[in-house]
Image (cartoon, rainbow, N blue to C red):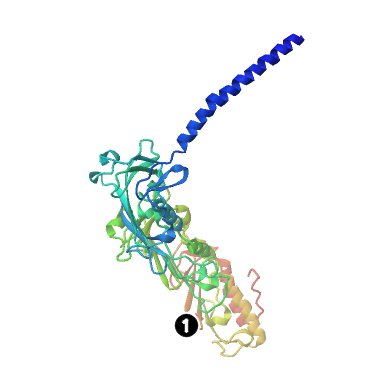
Amino acid sequence: MLKKQKRLIIIFAIAAVVLTSIYFFVITPLIAKWTATEEIIPELLPGEVLGINNRILMFEHVEKAAIQEIEVHNEFGTYTFYRDTDDEFYILNNKGAPYDLTALSSLVVASGYTLSMERVTTACTDWEEYGLDEYSNPAWYKLTTITGSEHIVYIGDVIPTGAGFYCRYADRDAVYILESSLSTTLLAPITNLITPILSFPMQQTDYFMARDFYIMHYDEIVIWIDYIADGVETNQPTTSFYEMKAPANYIPSSSYETVLQTFLQFTGLATLELGNTEEVLSDETLLKYGIDRENPAWVIHYKYSDIDNYIYFSEKNEDGTYYAYSLTFNLIALVDGNNLKFLDWDLINYVDNSLYMLNINDIAKVEVISDKITETFKLSGEGQTIEISPSSTNAVLDEDDVKNFRQLYKTFLSIKMENYSESTSTGNLLLNLKFTTDDGKLYDFKFYPYTTRRCYYTINGEGEFYVLRDIVEKAISDTIRFLSGEIIDSDAKN
């Protein structure tokens, strides 16, 4: 057994010596040869710069701070980014275009850091082979530095693997391969660099102060709401700040604020067309996207910070998106339909169930007209000094009667909209309530019963909804009770 162990030890020792010899005399020289091959530094042509991993830069790295202008020519057209006197970048002939800062950074890197994957040749004799000849009409760009140096690069065919593009530096006979990321920067349309913003952004603290907001569907006004609380200092919007101008003087519901919040930052999915600052996009361009400037499918308008925003829409596309044209930014964008669900709303979504929210302090006159009672109440002053006098007596109500009248006024306020009316007949008037404000506005409510439980009503002659008949009849009976000196309970059923 001992002899066998000794024999194995000798065999292992001989094997170790052989393996060590192979490593030092065979493997080590090969590693040295491979390493030496990898570390071969290429001979540089005039203007080239050695980059990382011995890769060649077509010209010295130009960072954003040193760039004056980037002029791009590709199959989609021509555009130029330039540095203005304020040290900011703008698009030539379109200074107000809302470009994306990240996209500009990518363009700066692509144009100023030309680290090649490979230099194919230093003496090309057949530019057509690489799509870099005149007849191939290659894309190209010119980068100008703030010191006046110019670098022109031509971009030819994509390489067989699709991983890059053949490129040429102007007046140099070398061919390089630059990475495929060029397809999303220098070879892309300018619209890829534009933020698809469609209206002037609003702030969270004052968005509810947007003025003259309306939506039109072709030639019909769907909704028109205005902010009416000029001079009120508040950060909390309430429905009392809004007035519906069309289709009738309904009270806007809280859903209106949800709609307004859409425009805190209203952007699309992608910019499709970009106009310049000299003229709006042509009718022909708009019609390609189903937008008729003269009779658009949808128009949204609002005024904010003294800027009128107009957005024109196509009809909804089959995939649920819309095409939208922003007159403010002169661009067309694709919009996610989920952000425009309110375009499918019925009027009732915008209408609060309260018929009105007029504070008694703002009322100059209340008229109650029915076949059972006709009376006019004149009001002046406000708060504890308010004076109320019925026309039937012309006497100013005392303090107790004023309190009782406030209960009657609460009865009027208790009349609520229920839903769409099945009838719009105005042949049988049950009650006419008129409220005239201190500034002379008239809110004329008329109630027409069409079942034992429902009344169709109009506001200044316009109407689509009904209220419960019981509360209308209570308003009449409470007026009679008040004039008879009875105590009014606005919460009572009858």
Residue 101 x/y as whole percent: 45, 58
Image quarter of residue 204: bottom right
Tell me the quarter of the image containing the N terminus. top right
Residue 388 x/y as whole percent: 58, 86
Q: Residue at x 60, y 82 (%)?
A: 483
Amino acid identity at mark 1: Gly
Q: Residue 325, can we see it? A: yes
Q: Residue at x 68, y 15 (%)?
A: 10
Tell me the quarter of the image containing the C terminus. bottom right
From the viewer's side, name the closer residue of 27 and 268.
27
From the viewer's side, name the closer residue of 344 and 282.
282
Residue 116 x/y as whole percent: 40, 44
Would you say 235 lies left or right of 218 here? right
From the viewer's side, name the closer residue of 314 and 391.
314
| Residue that carries the numbered disc 1 in the rendered image | 440
From the viewer's side, name the closer residue of 377 and 38.
38
Q: Is residue 417 above or below residue 113?
A: below
Residue 462 x/y as whole percent: 43, 69
Q: Residue at x 60, y 19 (%)?
A: 18
Secondary structure found at label 1: loop
